[in-house]
Amino acid sequence: MDDKIKLFKSKYIDITMGLKYLNHNEKLYLQILKNFVTRYQDLDVESLDDDRLKDTLHTIKGLSATLGMSELSELAESIYETRNRDRLSEFSMILQLIMDELKTKLIDKKQKTILIINDKVIDIDILFELLVDTYDIIVALDKESALEAIEGEDISMILLESDMLHVDALDIYDSIKSRMIPTVFIMDSLENKSINFDNFVTKPFNKKELINYINSH
């Protein structure tokens, strides 16, 4: 599996600069961004006394510069040097914009868990390789293991093979449909579509199309 992390595009952070400061260590950079959110998401700078404000601004000034948050760093430095509390509302606004973006990109965006119900090893291998970099993957080979996964995990979507070798796909679907989990049938082709179901994907799988389909449902 490719360990390279796909970084997001940001309106308020120069990610290229941040990575440069951290020797292009993407995992470390993302972890420090997450730590920044955890540490400062509830910060109310305008309520701090002068001593605490000075210490806080000094820390944020250096950390935000390292992370590529130039505007926030420069404003923190200006307030730190001039002791001008009138600019604290501007500082708070910029910090909040950064926080809102980071929470969306890093914290609140929960990775989807995909349950693949299939007993064809070749198809399982293909789907796993296509999806494992983007989602948490759970595989069930029969109805019992599928129900166990649904009971024990927070499943975002089910990919159900319509023509399994040893299991009745419709029997499985009848058992899981009451759980209200989005379920997508995997078809060999449209010509072989024997199940009257709106959500389906066909083989051969196209990674981009498959991920776009999953993300849109």
Image (spheres, rainbow, N blue to C red):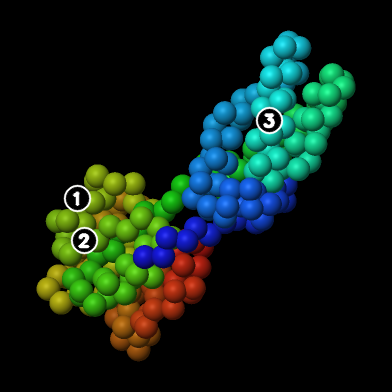
- Element class at badge 1: helix
How many labels were placed on the picture? 3
What residue occupies the far bottom of the structure in this picture? 191
Mark number for residue 112? none
- Element class at badge 2: strand
Give how far apart the Cα atoms at labels 3 and 2 are. 47 Å
In the displayed structure, 126 sits above or below 24; it is below
> What residue appears at the point 12 percent right and 73 percent down from the top-left corner?
166
In the displayed structure, 56 sits above or below 107; it is above
Q: Which residue is mark 1?
A: 148
Q: Is residue 108 visible?
A: no
Of marks 3 and 2, the one in the foreground: 3
In the image shown, does 46 or 165 lie closer to the viewer? 46
- Location of residue 55 by image quarter: top right
Mark 1 in CB contact with mark 2 (< 8 angstroms): yes
Amino acid type at image mark 3: Ile
Mark 3 in CB contact with mark 1 (< 8 angstroms): no
Give how far apart the Cα atoms at labels 1 and 2 are. 9 Å
Amino acid type at image mark 1: Glu
Of pointers 3 and 2, the one earlier in the residue sequence: 3
Of pointers 3 and 1, the one earlier in the residue sequence: 3
Residue 61, percent from left and from top: 72, 32
Q: Which residue is mark 2?
A: 140
Q: Which residue is mark 3?
A: 60
> What residue appears at the point 24 percent right and 44 percent down from the top-left corner?
152
Of marks 3 and 1, the one in the foreground: 3
In the image shown, does 83 or 128 lie closer to the viewer? 83
Mark 3 in CB contact with mark 2 (< 8 angstroms): no
Amino acid type at image mark 2: Ala
